[in-house]
Image: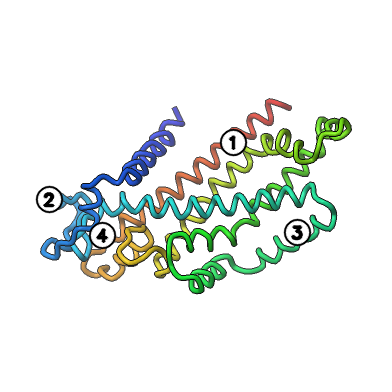
Amino acid sequence: MKSWPLITAVLVTVIVLIISLLEPAWLESWATERNLANRLQPPLSAGHLLGTDGLGRDVLARLLLGARHTFGIAAAATLIAASLGIAAGVLAAIGPALLRSAVGRIIDLTIAFPSLVLAVAMVAALGRGQLTLALALGLFNWPVFARVTAAETRGVLAQQYVTAARAFGVSPWRIVTAHVLPVIAPTLAVVVAFQFATLLISTAGLSFLGLGPGLGVPEWGAMLAEARAEMNQAPWLMLGPAIAIAWTVLLMNALGERVARRSRVAGNELL
């Protein structure tokens, strides 16, 4: 019974994403159609559950449509970071001594610089856009995956069955794909969940600063920036995107904790 709140939250989020990805005609119309005569309507107004923004656009429709942009950027950044980090972590664990040392120094050097500052510099150099923002966040957040992968891989490589596989002449890459990655997959899933939440906050934060998608794109961070301009007249405009961001972050953290708990239980049963 304790799982029902989490399952319900996941189902609600999935439904929102499906609606956002399908992008029905009515959603696009409500999210982009301007009506200055109907601007700054409060929540529960006629035809507008969450009210309207400064240009008369429906806030709920923009939140639903914005889920695609915010989730898409965070997911792409997480995929880039995970791909680079897992590959680097495996190399740091099974590669030659010189390669392991080089990868370790690169990880330390990347961690030494604030990832958000580097992301801002990259977006400023390449220009704003969803792909640029995803690349900027992904390219500077991979060391977390690399460190976890390297540590977990070394632990698996120390197991007796891996030593036996080596004795029978199994190649290192075969050992990684057949024995290491399946074992460390639950741990990596936990890291993915937590990093997705972190990168979603970073996505919204940079969009809030004007470094996200183009003008008018209903991204949650950009919606917060637009709501700031109307804070004195319509403070409720901040609530929608803020709650959406908080909801997603809390959900991903809860999923990560649930996967970690199940992994610990499974490990104890094996022992």
As drawn, 207 above or below 65: below
- N-term-proximal mark, 1 vs 2: 2
At x 63%, y 38%, the residue is: 185
**Residue carrying label 2:** 46
Residue 269 found in image quarter? top right
- N-term-proximal mark, 1 vs 3: 3
Task: Point out the image quarter for the N terminus.
Answer: top left
- Horizontal and vertical percent position of residue 245: 40, 53
**Residue carrying label 3:** 104
Tell me the distance, in whole angstroms, between the alpha carbons under discs 1 and 3: 29 Å
- N-term-proximal mark, 1 vs 4: 4
Q: Please tell me which residue lies in front, 34 or 186.
A: 34
Secondary structure of residue under mark 1: helix
**Residue carrying label 4:** 236
- N-term-proximal mark, 2 vs 3: 2
Tell me the distance, in whole angstroms, between the alpha carbons under discs 1 and 4: 37 Å
**Foreground mark, 1 or 3?**
3
Tell me the distance, in whole angstroms, between the alpha carbons under discs 2 and 3: 59 Å
Q: How crowded is mark 4: few (under 14 residues within 10 Å), some or many (20 or more)?
A: some
Q: Please tell me which residue lies in front, 8 or 121.
A: 121
Tell me the distance, in whole angstroms, between the alpha carbons under discs 1 and 2: 45 Å
**Foreground mark, 2 or 3?**
3
**Residue carrying label 1:** 261
Q: Residues within 10 Å of mark 3 (few under 14, many from 20)?
A: many
At x 60%, y 50%, the residue is: 82
Is 236 positioned to the left or the right of 193 in the image?
A: left
**Foreground mark, 3 or 4?**
3
